[in-house]
Image: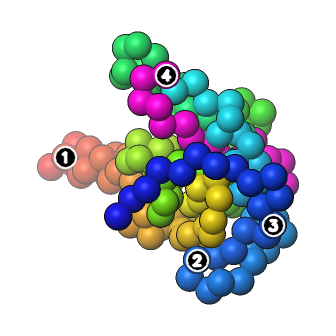
Amino acid sequence: MTNRTSAVPTDPGPIVDVATGEPLPPLLQDLAARARSAQALAYAPYSKFPVGAALLASDGRVFVGANIENASYGLTVCAERTAMYQAVLAGARQVTAIAICTNLSPPAAPCGMCRQTLAEFAEEAQIVLLSPIGPAQLTKLSTLLPQAFRPSALISTATSAHTEDDHRGRQ
């Protein structure tokens, strides 16, 4: 069963991994705390589903994002993509981890569009799914999006197309 949570404790203590009961490593603790804080920045008047994200670039910089809704629903941008776009605009091209905070327990995973966007910049990123209170669920992008369509597929496709064209011209 999925429950919505709304209470945010004043001192939540360490965030633990639901699978092991152990506290998250310090780097992921920080990322999770930033995602929880970013959730308060969400503009979600239509869905009432605020989401916060904090993304760790390979160079150590952290970028936060929140979902931003629009009356024309298709123009809504998810928290994960907001953080990713900020990272790209700042020159980051590799993501090592992302924390995502929703009001669901167990926490929600990123939508398909966000998974594919992350796949562009993250080969094997750690993902921390969490709620404003309680434990976190650790996973990997490859688990959430197996056999992702990645930039390398375009390179091999382009190479194959040129090879086929070369062979056709010789017949």
Which is more N-terminal, label 2 or label 4? Answer: 2
**Residue 47 highlighted magenta (yes or no):** yes
Which is more N-terminal, label 2 or label 3? Answer: 3
The amino acid type found where label 1 is placed reads Arg
Mark 4 falls on what kind of element? loop
> Residue under circle 4?
45
Instruction: Measure how far apart labels 1 and 4 are at the Cα level.
Output: 57 Å
The amino acid type found where label 4 is placed reads Pro
Mark 3 falls on what kind of element? loop
**Image quadrant in which the N terminus is located:** bottom left
Name the spot of residue 165 as percent of width and height, x first.
26, 44
For marks 1 and 4, give the one nearer the viewer.
Answer: 4
- Is the residue marked by circle 2 packed among few (<14), some (14-19), or many (20+) residues within 10 Å? some
Which is more N-terminal, label 2 or label 1? Answer: 2
Instruction: Measure how far apart labels 3 and 4 are at the Cα level.
Output: 30 Å
Mark 2 falls on what kind of element? loop
**Residue 124 highlighted magenta (yes or no):** no
Name the spot of residue 9 as percent of width and height, x first.
74, 54
> Residue under circle 3?
13
The label on residue 18 is 2
Mark 1 falls on what kind of element? helix
Viewer-proximal residue among 58 and 38: 38
Viewer-proximal residue among 155 and 23: 23
Which is more N-terminal, label 4 or label 1? Answer: 4
Q: Which residues are magenta?
A: 45-63
Q: Is residue 94 visible?
A: no
